[in-house]
Image: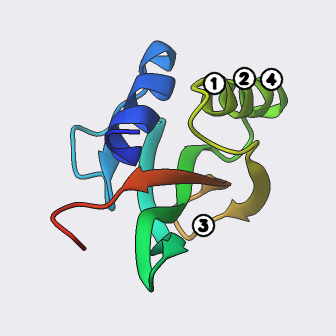
Amino acid sequence: MTSAFAEIIRAIKPFGIPHAPGKYEGEETEKWFTYNYADDRGNAFADDEPGDRLVSMQLHLFLPERENFISIRREIREAIFSTGEFTFPAFTDLGPDATGKRHLVFEFDGIEERENGI
């Protein structure tokens, strides 16, 4: 995998929903995605050196509190898994936040190459 963020963007682009890493600060909209690394560690060790990195990712969807999210939840999970780069996403509904937006979280793992020996 070249970049977990690039793969996530490729997966969510067909939904036509604005997105940003970390925090969305774009134009006001009813729905948006954010994504982040939840964990990033060495993996596939040989001779005390990691061969690559195991990354745990989070994809967040914010949408109107009362919007039915059952279909889009299924579609997002399949889109992420269908990249062939990530595990099947776990799902958590964090409910509405202080602004009245429902916060959905998808968590999944992937492998990234080591960069410059790091």
The amino acid type, in three-letter code, at marker 3 is Asp
Residue 99 place in picture, x, y as percent: 51, 62
Q: Residue furthest left?
A: 116
List the residue tagged with mark 4: 71
Q: Quadrant of residue 13?
A: top left
Q: Of helix, strand and loop, which one carries label 1?
A: helix
- Is the Cβ of the residue at disc 1 closer than 8 Å to that at disc 2? yes
Q: Earlier in the sequence, mark 3 or mark 2?
A: 2
Q: Earlier in the sequence, mark 1 or mark 4?
A: 4
Q: Which residue is mark 3?
A: 97
User: Horizontal placement of 94 versus 83: left or right?
Assistant: right
Viewer can see residue 39 = no
Examine the rendered structure and indicate whether residue 110 appears above or below residue 70.
below
Snapshot quadrant of residue 88: top right
Q: Which residue occupies the extreme bottom position in the image?
A: 48
Question: Dot 1: few (<14), some (14–19), or many (≥20) neighbours within 10 Å?
Answer: many
Is residue 63 in view?
Answer: yes
- Residue at horizontal 29 percent and vertical 39 percent from the top: 28
Q: Residue at x 53, y 58 (%)?
A: 57
In front here: 79 or 24? 79
Q: Check disc 4: other Cα within 10 Å, few if <14, some if 14-19, many if 20+.
A: few
Task: Say which element carries label 2.
Answer: helix
| Front label number (1 vs 3) | 1
- Residue closer to the observer: 8 or 41: 41
Q: Which residue is identified by label 2?
A: 75
Q: Which residue is mark 1?
A: 79
The picture places residue 8, in percent across and down from the top left corner, at 45, 37
Residue drawn where x is 32% and y is 60% of the image: 23
Residue plotted at (60% across, 67% down): 97
Question: In x, y percent, where is residue 40?
Answer: 45, 72
- What's the distance in space between the residues labelled 3 and 2, CA to CA? 23 Å
The amino acid type of the residue labelled 1 equals: Ala
